Image: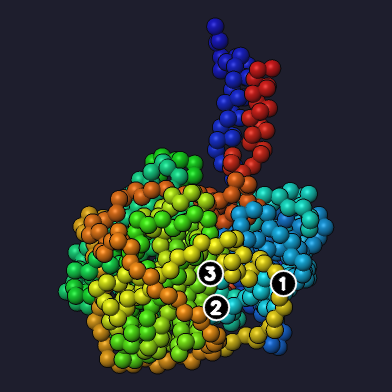
């Protein structure tokens, strides 16, 4: 008989040790700590941070004390053609920073600091795999330190535009909120001391993704959210309410909100208002991958995308001249589609993520509209995308835009495909010449629902035509088809513009509107080189441009947690789109537009089995899982929102002057989390424990 607890422990010590080791493996190990004492970062901050104009904390938590990475920067030189960056994280071996076209590894421009050789090394990546060393090293290390506190601090400098369009991204002017998309960034770090310029290791869960606005001026402390709160008369919140995330890897959940639902959430009843912006509310950033918000009008079955968010994203405000009209006879229905990730198949996660919608009763000068081109009504539904690499071209004829009596200001643009989308181009054509072109070279649906084009506003003139190209890489033997599910494919360009006119859809098989009936052509390509990418291909040096003028507001967005949604989504039918027309003309924003010849695209006939309308019922709450497009090899960087080290509200950023002030967190914790899938140590511990137990 075992008479005492001590005797029990002695008798069962092998089994208890095994249980303890298993718990150690199964529970993620947190290396976070709260820094209330002096450390190398606070010492550096007190002495050198005032030499930088701005900074951003990635993964800054709501209590303002915990973060993953600090980034400080300044544009330097009289002509501001260079940028100096300081990166800080809790790490022992290496610390990396990258400009990410779509927010992930493919199409990213990366610089890695390695402690072993005290060096900055320039890399680039075109897929989820180890990055490739750039044959032109454009970063210069200015200073570095790696301390006993396990912090790495490095300071480096690079040209804003290196002239290398094949291996480097420019730091683009991102200062105008409501027009410019923020710059998407990725960071990763690790403790492996063997990392050097020519030897990299996989980061595991030591990674993060976010946004920054590098072209803000010193001391510009305003945030998107602060501007929304200042300019709005109120807000409402729509979203999931105590939604139990399924214990499957990928789920797409749709939540529908009727006009009565929106009124119950705070929309003024019986009156029309202008919606001027949106802010994300994310309860479980490790599980909420991205979401899209669509607005509709009763009697119209088509949706208009008005807001898209992905991990690291922030609030969005419309230009000061325009707002989306909501009301009984305008947009009066919403659908929110949330992409949930649950890579550990955890059960019982309850989520209430959603969107805070800001409105004003004081109408702005113009109604904003959403113009969708390409295959906006998914008339290719049910048709195979095609095996291998395929190119799908859609046109929008000039007869469609001729119905507008005034030029239109395009203030935002989203390029939308799904999982096997590779590259997408959208061209504006005037007098048979391309006058404006937007491209995402490495589309990454795993990072967001749409690629928000970083650009200035531009003008669409009556009589302009358009061409939209979508390239796909299908390795499923033709199993992927066009359709409404996220496991299907789409090819749509969303153009946000003002003033709103009778322009909603233009492209393939718009049978109900012959003015906007475009052509469609599909071709199979021999190899990936025919896609026409420049980044990651071959080097070509070009002249570096100067920085363009900055306009107010030029600020860094800050996202903070707001109240939980209080209105449950309805199961009512959804419908969609136009709102009140206006007669006045906008003040046009001048842009410099390139010109080149465009070959004609021959129209083709319509497939006999193409649908002619959207279904009027909601898609299934749980849509099919997206086919994996990731390679079998483990990526070096893998920027996904499943990392458990992100802030509970997504990425929260604050841009303030670097001089310490009351706005700066009084203490910071830098976190490096590991879990059983991305760290070999727990497996070694478990192996040791089993041997110990049976030994």
Distance from Cα at disc 1 to Cα at disc 3: 19 Å
Residue situated in front as seen by the camera: 160 or 511: 511
The dot on residue 675 is: none
Pinpoint residue 310: horizontal percent, then vertical percent: 47, 62
Q: Is residue 330 above or below residue 626?
A: below
Would you say 197 lies left or right of 203 here?
right
Local crowd size for mark 2, using a 10 Å CA cut-off: few (<14), some (14–19), many (≥20): many
Residue bearing the label numbered 2? 174
Would you say 176 lies left or right of 507 here?
right
Residue bearing the label numbered 1? 539
Pinpoint residue 413: horizontal percent, then vertical percent: 44, 75
* Residue drawn at point x = 25 percent, y = 64 percent: 613
Quick one: quadrant of the N terminus?
A: top right
Q: Is residue 23 above or below residue 413?
A: above
Q: Earlier in the sequence, mark 2 or mark 3?
A: 2
- Judge depth for marks 2 and 1 and give the one in front: 1
Q: Residue furthest top?
A: 1
Regarding residue 694, the answer to whether it shows in the image is yes
Local crowd size for mark 1, using a 10 Å CA cut-off: few (<14), some (14–19), many (≥20): some
- Residue contact between numbered discs 1 and 3, judged by CB atoms under 8 Å: no
Pinpoint residue 554: horizontal percent, then vertical percent: 52, 81
Residue situated in front as seen by the camera: 161 or 371: 371
* Residue drawn at point x = 82 percent, y = 58 percent: 117
Residue bearing the label numbered 3? 440
């Amino acid at each position: 008989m075992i008479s005492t607890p001590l005797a029990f422990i002695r008798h069962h010590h092998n089994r208890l040790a095994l249980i303890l080791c298993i718990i150690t493996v199964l529970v993620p190990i947190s290396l976070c700590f709260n820094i209330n004492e002096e450390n190398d970062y606070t010492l550096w901050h007190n002495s050198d941070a005032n030499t930088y104009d701005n900074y951003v904390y990635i993964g800054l938590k709501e209590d303002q004390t915990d973060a993953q990475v600090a980034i400080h920067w300044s544009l330097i030189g009289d002509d501001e053609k260079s940028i100096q960056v300081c990166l800080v994280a809790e790490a022992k071996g290496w610390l990396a920073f990258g400009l990410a076209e779509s927010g992930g590894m493919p199409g990213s421009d990366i610089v890695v600091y390695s402690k072993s050789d005290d060096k900055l090394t320039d890399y680039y990546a075109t897929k989820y795999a180890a990055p490739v060393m750039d044959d032109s090293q454009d970063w210069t290390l200015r200073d570095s330190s790696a301390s006993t506190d396990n912090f790495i601090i490095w300071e480096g400098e690079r040209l804003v535009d290196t002239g290398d369009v094949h291996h480097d991204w420019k730091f683009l002017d991102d200062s105008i909120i409501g027009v410019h998309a923020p710059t998407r960034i990725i960071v990763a770090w690790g403790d492996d001391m063997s990392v050097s310029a020519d030897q990299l290791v996989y980061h595991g869960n030591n990674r993060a993704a976010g946004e920054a606005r590098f072209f803000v001026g010193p001391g510009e402390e305003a945030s998107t959210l602060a501007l929304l709160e200042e300019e709005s008369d109120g807000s409402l919140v729509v979203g999931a309410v105590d939604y139990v995330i399924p214990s499957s890897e990928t789920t797409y959940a749709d939540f529908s909100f009727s006009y009565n639902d929106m009124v119950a959430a705070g929309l003024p009843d019986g009156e029309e208002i202008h919606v001027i912006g949106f802010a994300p509310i994310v309860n479980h950033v490790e599980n909420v991958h991205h979401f899209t918000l669509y607005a509709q009008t009763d009697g119209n079955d088509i949706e208009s995308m008005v807001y898209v968010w992905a991990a690291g994203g922030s609030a969005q405000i419309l230009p000061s001249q325009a707002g989306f009209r909501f009301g009984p006879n305008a947009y009066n229905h919403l659908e929110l589609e949330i992409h949930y990730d649950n890579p550990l198949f955890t059960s019982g996660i309850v989520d209430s993520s959603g969107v805070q919608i800001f409105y004003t009763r004081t109408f702005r000068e113009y109604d904003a509209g959403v113009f969708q081109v390409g295959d906006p009504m998914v008339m290719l539904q049910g048709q195979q995308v095609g095996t291998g690499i395929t190119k799908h071209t859609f046109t929008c004829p000039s007869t469609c835009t001729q119905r507008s009596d005034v030029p239109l200001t395009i203030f935002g643009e989203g390029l939308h495909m799904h999982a096997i989308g590779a590259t997408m181009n959208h061209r504006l054509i005037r007098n048979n010449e391309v006058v404006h072109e937007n491209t995402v070279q490495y589309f990454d649906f795993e990072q967001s629902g749409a690629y928000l084009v970083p650009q200035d506003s531009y003008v669409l003139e009556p009589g302009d035509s358009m061409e939209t190209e979508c390239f796909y890489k299908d390795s499923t033997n033709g199993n992927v088809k066009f359709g409404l599910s996220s496991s299907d494919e789409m090819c749509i360009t969303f153009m946000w513009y003002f003033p709103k006119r009778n322009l909603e859809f233009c492209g393939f098989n718009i049978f109900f509107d012959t003015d906007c009936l475009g052509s469609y052509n599909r071709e199979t390509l021999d190899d990936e080189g025919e896609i026409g990418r420049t980044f990651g291909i071959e080097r070509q040096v070009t002249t570096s441009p100067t920085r363009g003028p900055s306009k107010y507001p030029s600020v860094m967005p800050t996202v903070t947690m707001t109240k939980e949604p209080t209105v449950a989504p309805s199961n009512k039918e959804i419908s969609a789109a136009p709102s009140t027309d206006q007669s006045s003309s906008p003040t046009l924003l001048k842009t410099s537009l390139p010109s080149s010849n465009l070959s004609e695209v021959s129209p083709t006939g319509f497939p006999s089995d193409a649908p002619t309308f959207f279904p009027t019922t909601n898609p299934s709450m749980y849509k099919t899982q997206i086919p994996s497009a990731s390679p079998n090899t483990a990526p070096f960087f893998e920027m996904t929102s499943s990392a458990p080290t992100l802030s509970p509200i997504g990425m929260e950023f604050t841009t303030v002057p670097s001089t310490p002030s009351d706005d700066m967190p009084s203490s910071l914790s830098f976190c490096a989390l590991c879990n059983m899938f991305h760290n070999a140590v727990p497996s070694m511990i478990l192996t040791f424990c089993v041997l110990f137990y049976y030994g």
